[in-house]
Image: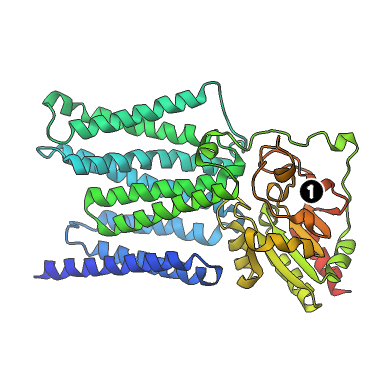
Amino acid sequence: MNDQIGALFVQVAYIGASAAFILGLRGLTKPGTARRGMQLAAFGMLLAIIGTLLNHEIITYEFIIIGLVVGTAIGLPMGLLVPMTAMPQRVAISHMFGALAVTLVGIAEFLHYRDIPGGPGAVKMVALGFETLFGALTITGSFMAFGKLQGILPGRPITFFGQKFVNAAIFFGAVALYVTLVVTQSGGATDAAADLGVPMFFAMTALALIIGITLVLPIGGADMPVVVSLLNSYAGLAASATGFAIGNNILIVAGALDGASGFILSILMSRAMNRSFANVLFGAFGGEKVAVAGKSAEGLTTRSVTPEEAAMRLGYARNVIIVPGYGMAVAQAQHAVRELAELIEHRGGRVRFAIHPVAGRMPGHMNVLLAEANVPYDHLFDLDEINGEFAACDVALVLGANDVTNPAAKSDPGSPIYGMPILNVADAEQVIVVKRGMATGFAGIENELFYLDKTSMLFGDAKSVLGQVVSEVKGL
């Protein structure tokens, strides 16, 4: 009777957790409800953990307690101490750890069923193979993404002759082993074939680990937001397969939500760059191509502006659009940006923030930073909402956003970003660009915006120079 009550409580907890996950995901669709959505999702995870801990199949809690302590000791500092600028790397590492857990469960379950007459059966073997295959490639893929985001690995694509053929051979080799495992380990194969199960399983896992490396290395830094989102989808699909393999409903639901949302987000971000999945994964975008290189040598120059001059333009502007980019994230300038926006509004001006879907290094990077600085949600506008407003803008202030403001995406068919939707910053009456120097963005190309007559460059660390601008505006 007690076991029945406990099992009922576990299922109720899982249903509650599933509902919290779904409502939390729905809350993330709007900036105004995103915080509540995260809180709901966190509450759902707490319910799922409690329900799992009360599972009657648990024999001993020793290793579970050790895992909780170690996980808390690692996760708490990561959440509190990792700066917002390093959030993309932290997300990539989180995907790696999640995929590692899934892969280890898959390996343990496969070895467990090896000792049971008849093996795991066809359905469970499909799930076990899928979770291990996708989990393993997500481990190394996420680690490669972390390396590129952290600067340990070059941000440019790392390629070699015949790489696509090598990747295809490894991928199809892993798939062939997966299919063979499903056929031979489902109880209907000969003993000789069944005995090859363990070496084939570990060979498939090894190939999957290699796939993760070879899949991400040839992808350039400009595509990292899409890659992070796609890896999130892979991890979710692997977790859902784990749920089928071990009979855990909450893993099935949570993994499916994670996998589907990550896949949809990847599609939306690819569309935002006017590119296909195949082009993102195999196009080696972000390489050191040059679209307008040499123009400055032909006589084109930039025009610099001092913080005092920038303050005069911004302080007396009636309509200002701020375009945040990775430069703002690196300098942790979001609080200075918010203070500047408040000063402009106090003087009677209107300030809005233009958010490009792939600005920064992970999905929603700019939204997270601005939310941290308490910028009102109704001040944030996406590309489609704000692009038509630049023509009526007095001053557009660009904070380290490079490729997403480059007019070459519209004017130069030879540019690697040609066709990518950009923010129409060049339509503003005046443009002020805050940058440390003239370095190119992730796409490795010069930005034509910087050489326009209406553009002024404010060189320096965004937090420092905006602090000076804020001081000057206060004195107007």
Q: Residue at x 76, y 69 (%)?
A: 340
Q: Is residue 287 above or below residue 387?
A: above
**Which residue lies at the image location 40% right of the left edge and 55% below the top edge?**
258
Residue 372, percent from left and from top: 60, 67
Q: Is residue 427 left or right of residue 284?
A: right
In which quarter of the view is residue 461 placed?
bottom right
119 and 23: which one is in front?
Answer: 23
- Does residue 229 show up? yes
Location of residue 60 with respect to 120 vertically, above or below: below
Badge 1: residue crowd in 10 Å (few <14, some 14–19, many ≥20)? many
Q: Please name the amino acid that badge 1 sits on.
A: Leu
Spot occupied by residue 285 in the image (x, y as percentages of width and height): 60, 37
Q: Quadrant of the C terminus?
A: bottom right
Q: Secondary structure at mark 1?
A: helix
Q: In the rendered image, which quarter contains the N terminus?
A: bottom left
Query: Badge 1 is on which residue?
Result: 449
Taking depth in this image into account, of 230 and 271 the one nearest to the observer is 271
Res. 377 image quadrant: bottom right
In screen coordinates, is 257 left or right of 425? left
On the question of residue 151 being in view, the answer is no
